[in-house]
Image (spheres, rainbow, N blue to C red):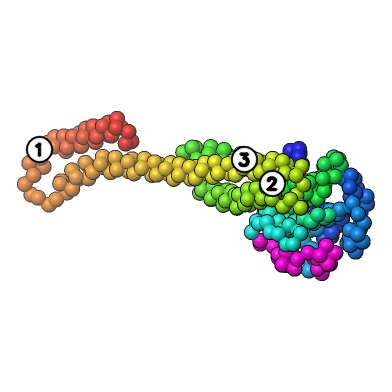
Amino acid sequence: MPNDAALPLPSSAARDRTRGPVINCVAYNRNGKRISDITVDAISDVLKEPDTFIWLGLHEPDETLLLKIQEEFDLHELAIEDAQHAHQRPKIEVYDDTLFVVVHTAQFVGGKVEFGETHIFLGKRFLVTVRHGASLSYARARSICEQTPEMLALGPSFGLYAILDFIVDNYFPIVSSFEAELKELELRIFNEKFDRNTIERLYYLKRELVTLRLAVTPMHDILNQLKRFFPGLIQEDVRVYFRDVLDHAVRMSEATSTLGEMISAALQVNLAMVSVGQNEVTKRLAGWAAILAIPTTVGAVYGMNFEHIPELKWQYGYHVVVAATVVACSGLYWRLKKAGWL
């Protein structure tokens, strides 16, 4: 699919809220051309007609609607139960002649990355998507498929490819934003000033990256199975497209892995820079302490209550002691300055 299929749709979430849980329910003919929009109640009637298939998109449906979908498509109750409750792990399961696929999605919401889930039912003559949480609308993927009816004529499996490709491609701008933020944080690290916010942001960035990797990595197994198995549900001509999506997913995994190592290195460098700064402060404090120890020692000696100190009766004793102290402090300062301690 073209890369622009993964571009954000700023108003998609708002459109979903206004349109309700049923986003799209469309019937297509054997040539991949749209017949018409249909109601949920008309699904079973349309499926009775030969050479048609249905593409249904749902967004956070309630239990009543899911039970209706189960009845219309004759879906397994365990799959419907999973689709009703989010927080499922990415997986692919087979129920009779239906595939049930769970994938995790990611989207920018308010400048932050939010994660959601999409549950997909694939049958020989239907494709149903159930979105939960943060997720872009699949209307863009559907529109691109409808612009190439000769490909959509391959059936619901091509629609499944379009959705998975849309999801994987949408990971890339998120990783690009992570890379840009990491570069900015690296500049902060080397400004020779300790910044607590830099450490905190590096930690949160790594946490978000780990969550993204948990979404991307399971896609490998899902796509591997789709390009190799399920001959009754996946058309042979579509398998090469799943291989292309798998290649994108592998590239994404490599990018997240590399970025994770860079973030870990940035954390270590930041801690090293803090340690170096602390060592510099310690060296300066130790140097000045050594310099101040000279007049302190001299003052301590002459501050003792001894009666017979030779210099006490000498006219120039005070001047000589002060001069000797200054010379000793100056000499020590010069040596420490040369050594890089001051």
Would you place residue 293 above or below residue 79 in this image? above
Residue occupying image coordinates x 20% and y 37%: 325
Tell me which secondary structure the magenta stretch mostly adopts: helix
Instruction: Tell whether label 3 touches label 1 (CB within 8 Å).
Output: no
Q: Of the residues shown, which amino acid type is indicated by label 3?
A: Arg
Residue 24 appears in view:
no
Residue occupying image coordinates x 69% and y 46%: 227
In screen coordinates, is 96 left or right of 328? Answer: right
Lower sequence index among marks 3 and 2: 2
Crowding near the residue tagged with mark 2, few <14, some 14–19, many ≥20 C-alpha atoms within 10 Å: many
Q: Is residue 241 magenta?
A: no
Work out which quarter of the rendered image holds the C terminus and state it.
top left
Crowding near the residue tagged with mark 1, few <14, some 14–19, many ≥20 C-alpha atoms within 10 Å: few
* Residue identifier under label 1: 314
Quadrant in which residue 150 is drawn: top right
Q: Of the residues shown, which amino acid type is indicated by label 1?
A: Trp
Q: Nearer the viewer, mark 2 or mark 1?
A: 2
Q: Which mark is residue 251?
A: 3
Lower sequence index among marks 1 and 3: 3
* Residue identifier under label 2: 227
Q: Of the residues shown, which amino acid type is indicated by label 2?
A: Lys
In this rendered view, identify the residue nearer to me: 216 or 49. 49
Magenta span of residues: 64-88
Horizontal and vertical percent position of residue 60:
77, 61
3D distance between C-alphas at marks 2 and 1: 102 Å
Secondary element under disc 1, as helix, strand or loop, is: loop
